[in-house]
Amino acid sequence: MLTADTTSLPFAAAILIGWLGGVHCLGMCGGIVSALSLSVPATRRPALLLAYNAGRCLTYTLLGALAGLLGYAGVSVLGLGPKVLFALANLLLIGMGLYLMGWPVLVRPLEQGGQLVWRHIEPLARRFFPVTTPLRALVVGLAWGFLPCGLVYSALATAIATSNPLTGALWMAGFALGTLPNLLLAGWMGAGLLNRLRQSALRWLAGALVAAWGLYGMAQLLELL
């Protein structure tokens, strides 16, 4: 769990949140990765899938380092206290949980901001279509990491609370690792089959667990106050 000084966001917690958020990833990215990978022969599919996801995970990790650096600047330059960052982290965890359950009110502004970034990156990624080699897949994956997803942008905003570039990078690397199983399966089997999970009670359970995690952190903060 997040500690009261917000200097460490456990790697295992990031993996768990990324995995629980996988029911959303199937809807946001599953169709993309399955369309890209299923269009090539099965013998070439594993290499392309690994390259896509390596690029995506690398982007998440680098953005996590940047988020941690922003948090450090907030602490050292603006004088933000650790309790403020701790509250931000857990508020965003609640927002992620609600987002998974279909209530994006806390996360939607982040997603809308991400759309502004994606407008500039998406045309660059299209230059590498059709994706026929692992190198092209890697570049598309790097761009794919900027896809405007409220879950990803919330995780990045949570990484700000680490106020440390290395810890922020590790947090987002764990989150990326947690998203891998669903997206690798979607790329191999097709998103249609796995999308049934997204429509099931699993989506609500995942959202409830993530939101409960954030609520528990807020309760900890109230005890400190």
Image (cartoon, rainbow, N blue to C red):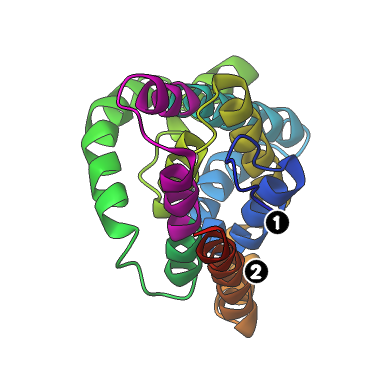
Q: Give the residue displayed 59% in from the left and 15% down from the top.
A: 135
Numbered disc 1: secondary structure: helix
**Alpha carbon separation for disc pair 2 and 1:** 7 Å
Q: Which corner quadrant of the image does residue 214 belong to?
A: bottom right
Q: For the N terminus, which image quadrant?
A: bottom right
Label 2 neighbour load within 10 Å: few <14, some 14-19, many 20+: few
x, y percent for residue 186: 65, 54
Question: Which residue does the numbered mark 1 point to in the structure image?
Answer: 189
Q: Give the residue displayed 34% in from the left and 28% down from the top.
A: 79
Kindly tell me whether residue 186 is visible in this rendering.
Answer: no
Q: Residue furthest bottom?
A: 201
x, y percent for residue 76: 40, 20
Kindly tell me whether residue 86 is visible in this rendering.
Answer: yes
Circle on res. 68:
none
* Discs 2, 1 touching: Cβ within 8 Å: yes
Instruction: Please say if 127 is above or below 192.
Output: above
x, y percent for residue 25: 54, 56
Residue nearer the viewer, 143 or 135? 143
Amino acid under disc 1: Met
Circle on res. 193:
2
Residues drawn in magenta = 68-92
Q: Is residue 69 highlighted in magenta?
A: yes
93 on left or right of 173: left
Q: Which corner quadrant of the image does residue 207 belong to?
A: bottom right
Residue nearer the viewer, 165 or 202? 165
Q: Main secondary structure of the magenta part?
A: helix
Residue nearer the viewer, 109 or 190? 109
Amino acid under disc 2: Leu
